[in-house]
Amino acid sequence: MEKKYKYLISGIVILALIGFYYTFNSSGPTSGKTSPKDGELYTVKMALYPNYDPIYVGQEKGFYLEEGIKIEFVGALPFEQMVMAVVNGDINVAGGHANRVINGITNGAKIKAVAATSKTIPGYPHMTLFVLEKSNIRSAKDLIGKKVAIWGFGGCSEFMMYEYMRQKAGVSNPKESIELVSMPDAQQEQALKSGLVDAVFIHAPYSKKLTNTGGVIKLFDDNDLEKSLGLAAYFVSDDFIEKHPDVVKRFVKATAKSLDWSNEHREEAYQITASRLDMDVKDMEGYYSPEHGLIIDSEVQNWIGTLTKYGLVKDGQVKTSDIYTNEFNPYFKN
């Protein structure tokens, strides 16, 4: 009888442990639940981002766990595949520049930006263009006919370069004024110094690393453009919003806290990100994030206007409210 009693107690303990495991390792969409209950940990799947990203800070500081969110990185994805991965449910949240969200929506993707991640301000550019110190390139006009490395077509770097050439070199057809070459930021320094390209248009933190190694001159950064194109944002699918609105709300709240904390504790944020990217902290720098992660309407409109100018969006095809919402942000006031 005593032996059976012991087995019964053991079984109860095992069942309790199983219940505890599933409560704190919920896989989100696969669980079939519309939103996490109090005490549940909901897994939000994202792609790895090999650059500065306050998501890493939020993970380290426990801001997502406080909101019942576990971030699971499922591997790296090209930016060109992010929209489709979100729509298909392969990942739940993706980060990208506003123009990628706009392009996705105008091409039929049911997605929405829910939190801003970066904003261009003096001292914190989104991208910086460098040339070799020994080259004879010292202005936008000197770049005409030259090869410039960017990280991917269809992204921020492509259209920022076009706008730089249009505004500063006075060319009427920026797309034909330079030859763009696509390669990851991490490969651009070697490409520049080996002569494969004449200039690199590079994101943080690789811009700081390139400056530290020397032999280059900064030609411009995106603060020099007439209108800000520095807005990037996290976006989710309309389907995910419909099925898991509370998860979106929790994610946005934790993200807002991560962004604000990273702005206020930049040195520690750099240390956390440098460790995640396996970089020397002296080579680390990052973006400035809009306060509380709130998306700024005028910056979305700047991107719509830019894409309209280059024929990717028809005049009047979309409005800013089609692209983003701040409704899940606890700091938003109508």
Image (spheres, grey):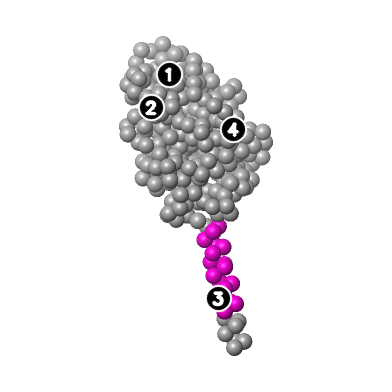
Cα–Cα span, label 3 and label 1: 67 Å
Q: Please provide the residue range marked out in magenta.
A: 8-24
- The answer to whether 9 appears left or right of 319 in the picture is right
Label disc, if present, on residue 180 of the rendered structure: 2
Where in the figure is residue 304, as x and y percent of width and height? 41, 22
* Callout 3 secondary element: helix
Looking at marks 2 and 3 on the same chain, the residue that comes earlier in the sequence is marked by 3
Residue type pointed to by label 2: Leu
Cα–Cα span, label 3 and label 4: 47 Å
Looking at marks 1 and 4 on the same chain, the residue that comes earlier in the sequence is marked by 1
Residue type pointed to by label 4: Tyr
Give above or below for 116 relative to 240: above
Cα–Cα span, label 2 and label 1: 14 Å
Residue type pointed to by label 3: Gly
Residue type pointed to by label 1: Glu
The reply to whether residue 106 is in sight is yes
Residue placed furthest toward the bottom: 1
Label disc, if present, on residue 163 of the rendered structure: 1
Looking at marks 3 and 4 on the same chain, the residue that comes earlier in the sequence is marked by 3
Where in the figure is residue 262, as x and y percent of width and height? 63, 36
Residue at the image position 55 percent from the left and 57 percent from the top:
24
Q: Is disc 3 in contact with disc 1, using a CB cutoff of under 8 Å?
A: no
Q: Name the residue under label 4.
A: 331
Where in the figure is residue 212, as x and y percent of width and height? 60, 32
Q: Quadrant of residue 235?
A: top left
Looking at marks 2 and 4 on the same chain, the residue that comes earlier in the sequence is marked by 2
